[in-house]
Amino acid sequence: MKKMERKFGKYAIPGLMRYVIVLYIVGVIIGIAAPELYENYLALDIEAVLHGQIWRLVTFIIAPPNSSLLMMLIVLYMYYIIGDNLERRWGTFAFNLYFLMGILFNILAAVVTYLVFGETFTVGTYFLNMSLFFAFVTEFGDAQFLLFFIIPIKGKWLGYLNAIYFIVTIVGGLLFYVNPMISFQLLSWGVPALPQYALAALFSMLNYAVFYWLYRQSYRPTAAQKKVQRQFKAQVTEAKKMERARAGQARHRCAVCGRTELDDPSLEFRFCSKCEGNYEYCQDHLYTHQHVTKPKNQED
C-alpha cells in the first residue's frame, strides 16, 4: 500500500465523501423526478453491461440509501461524518482506496451472482455503505450514536449488532437451497436471507477484511520502530514515577506531631532559633514545643 501511495497518491481525491454525498443527492433527485430512470439506465445490471452499457459500472453508486426523504438526509449526513473521519484517520489515499475497493467488490458480487444464479441483481450501495460503517466503528469504537434518536450507544456495540445481522444474512442466504423455510422465516423478520444478498454481504465483508490486512501489513511498525516505541514508553513511565515520587515527598515536617504540608496545605512551618539543631515546627507547636539543647558535657 505504501508503494501504491507513492505512485498513485497524487491522484487521490481530498474530501472524497463530500463528492459521494453530492452524487447521492443527485440520486435522490432522480428517484423523486424519474424513479424508473435509475433502474432502466443507471443501476448495476451485469447483463446490460455485457450488452455495452458499461457506464452502469460507475453510475450505480448514485443510488442513495433506500428510505424516507427525511431519514435519507439524516443517513447521508451520518455517512459524510463517517467518511470524513476515516479520511482524517487513514489519510486521503487510503480512504480513496477503501472506497474504490468497495465499488470493485460490489461489482464482483453482481458478476458472481449473474454467473452463479443466471440473473441480474442490482446491488445498489447498501453493502458498500455498511462496509464504511464497519470501518468507522473499528477506528472509533467509543463514538456515541443515538439509537432511535433516544438511546445512547457506543459505535462498537452497533458494530457487533450489524456483524450478527450480516452473519445471519450470509448463512441464511446460503441455506436457501438446503432448507428454504429458514430463509423465508428470516425474510419475515426483515433479514434479506437470499443467496444474492448473501453474496453481496460476503463480498462487502471481504472488502473490509482485505483492506485491513493490506493496511496493517503496510503500516505496522518494524522491529526497530517497535524497539524505539518500547524505549519511549519506558522513559515516559519512569518520568511519571519520578514525578509521583517528587509529589509524595514532603519538604516540611513538624518535629512534634510529624505533620507535613501534604497533610494540610494550609499549615505553616518555621525553624526555632532557640533549638540547637535542624528542627522544624508547625504553627501549632512553634511556640509550645520544648526546646532541644545539647547536653552541657557534650564535646564539640
Image (spheres, rainbow, N blue to C red):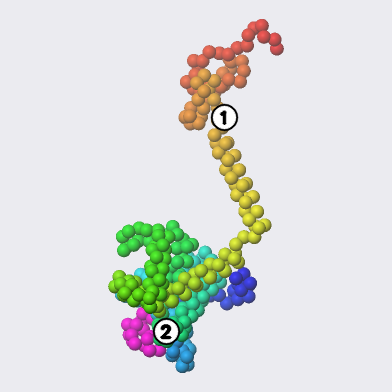
For this orientation, the residue located farthest to the top is 297
Q: Main secondary structure of the magenta part?
A: helix
Mark 2 nearby-residue class (10 Å; few <14, some 14–19, many ≥20): few
Residue positioned most to the right = 300
Which residue carries the number 2 mark? 117
Furthest toward the left, the residue is: 188
Helix, strand or loop at label 2? It is helix
Q: How many marks?
A: 2
Magenta segment: does it hold 30?
Answer: yes
Left/right placement of residue 16 relative to residue 294 reads left
Question: In this rendering, which labeled residue sits more in front, label 2 or label 1?
Answer: 2
Task: Indicate whether residue 11 is drawn in magenta.
Answer: no
Residue at image x 70%, y 10%? Answer: 299
The residue under the point 56% across, 32% down is 249
Q: Position of residue 226 (x, y in %)?
A: 63, 56
Check the picture and name the quadrant holding the N terminus.
bottom right
Residue drawn at 58 percent across, 17 percent down: 273
Nearest the camera: 285 or 160? 160
Callout 1 amino acid: Arg
Is residue 216 in view? yes
Range shown magenta: 25-44
User: Which residue occupies the foreground of this view, 267 or 111?
Assistant: 111
Task: Note whether residue 45 is visible.
Answer: no
Query: Pointer 2 and pointer 1: residues touching (CB < 8 Å)?
Result: no
Q: For the residue labelled by badge 1, is the local secondary structure a helix, a strand or a loop?
A: loop
Q: Is residue 161 left or right of residue 57?
A: left
Q: Amino acid at mark 2?
A: Phe
Residue at image mark 1: 251
Name the image quarter holding residue 41: bottom left
Residue at x 43%, y 73% (from the top left corner): 201
